[in-house]
Amino acid sequence: MQSYSFASRVSGMQSSVIREILKVTEQPEVISFAGGLPAPELFPLPAMRLAAKAALGGEDGSILQYSTTEGYPPLREWIAGYLNRMDIPAAPDQILVTSGSQQGLDLLAKLFIDPGDAVLVGNPTYLGALQVFNSYQARAVPVPSDAYGMDPAALAQALRRYRPKLAYLMPTFQNPTGTTLGLERRIELVKVLAEADVPFLEDSPYRELRYSGTAMPPLSSLAGDAPHAFLGTFSKTVAPGLRLGWIATEPSLLAKLVLAKQGADLHTGTLVQRALYRYLADSDVSSHLGRLRREYGRRRDAMVGALRRHFPAGVEWTEPEGGMFLWVTLPEGANSTELLPRAIEQRVAYVPGSPFFALPGGENCMRLNFSNTSPERIEEGIERLAQVLRG
Ligand code: PMP
């Protein structure tokens, strides 16, 4: 083993608990509620095959050439049109195509965070965002959240107290809890952020996956001149292996993001951008989304039903209107990390709660994914998990 003298920021990089668990759960006999994976049988494979073929059919070779950092212009136009339909007034030149929204988070953190800077996050929040903020040596400060999401009064207090560089919010089908902010909270949170003049990052990968209830306006549609960036992705609506996402923001921040991305990877793959654009332009995207919503909605219902049937008294869970996860709270004193090896013995897996918290907490919680398992296997897996909980 070599001993390297790494930069001090490396000490903030921890291996993701989820990646470690995923290694175990690749065994087919394990029913895994651990990953955040979409259902591969629902990928639009035939249409994507045609799209890739059509994209590669051009004669001039430019599909295999270097291209602009900002992204493929027709794809940026498509994204702007999509955002405009939900009242986010972004022009195509306000879109930066990224290698997944994960890269968007990384680029934004790279631009804003000096070691020790505070970033406000939900409590709990997306583990992958905590990983990014930690790698830039940020101080991730959790803002108290309840069953309806982040609390505006607590946000106002944290903004005054910590003077953060950024606030990171997931208003719709939050990862990990599945919680969605109501309209009044959205308006209040944006008002509080605008008054403090702290840029907010609206991360919204699950927005299109709504199975019940009514759509809420994105925070970015309510923001006016308040500084913000919207992070989007095709990972949950088309396929995550494409690694295609975007940041939409105002021109001066976008220009800095372009510089940051140049240093990271010059640009996102030309072939994959053009193939995705052909897919979006040539196929019936809304019926594909309809199919995803129907099937994932069935899986959500299967999980909620199984929890009601099998889980012991004293255990609580969220019943989200969309997304891919629900969040289970075991009685006080239970420890989901300690339970995990027993669950894996019973051939069922989940992600323990504590990695989703910026500070110690959530030991009695767990995140369950329902998108990657058939309703029948969900029933079986929840029964197995219920047995583990009964001890
Ligand atoms: N943000 C959130 C909240 C997520 O759950 C994920 C993926 N699980 C990402 C960002 C990153 O997604 P991607 O890079 O595939 O767009």
Image: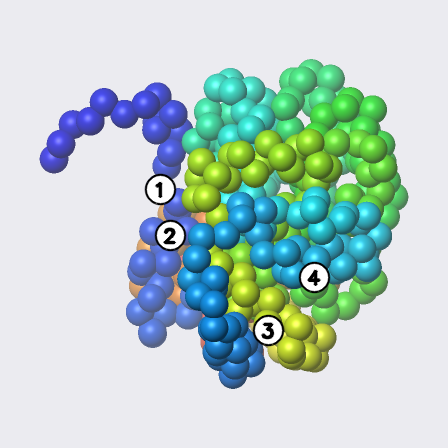
**Residue tagged by mark 3?**
279
For the residues carrying marks 2 and 4, which lies nearer the camera in this image? 4
Q: State whether label 1 is within 8 Å of ligand 1.
A: no
Amino acid on which the number 1 mark rests in the picture: Ser
Rendered location of residue 319, percent (x, y): 68, 61
Which image quadrant: the C terminus? bottom left
**Residue tagged by mark 4?**
78
Q: Residues within 10 Å of mark 2 (few under 14, many from 20)?
A: few
Q: Secondary structure at mark 4?
A: helix
For the residues carrying marks 4 and 1, which lies nearer the camera in this image? 4
**Residue tagged by mark 2?**
19
Q: Which mark is residue 15?
A: 1
For the residues carrying marks 3 and 2, which lies nearer the camera in this image? 3
**In the orientation shown, which residue stands out farthest toward the left?**
1
Query: Cβ–Cβ below 8 Å for labels 3 and 2?
Result: no
Q: State whether label 3 is within 8 Å of ligand 1.
A: no
Q: State whether label 4 is within 8 Å of ligand 1.
A: no
Q: Earlier in the sequence, mark 3 or mark 2?
A: 2
Q: Earlier in the sequence, mark 3 or mark 1?
A: 1
For the residues carrying marks 3 and 1, which lies nearer the camera in this image? 3
Amino acid on which the number 2 mark rests in the picture: Arg
Rendered location of residue 132, percent (x, y): 48, 37
Q: Which mark is residue 288?
A: none
The residue sitting at 51% across, 20% down in the picture is 114
Rendered location of residue 320, percent (x, y): 69, 60
Q: Earlier in the sequence, mark 2 or mark 4?
A: 2
Q: Secondary structure at mark 3?
A: helix
Vertical placement of residue 126 versus 242, above or below: above
User: On the rendered structure, is 276 left or right of 145?
Assistant: left
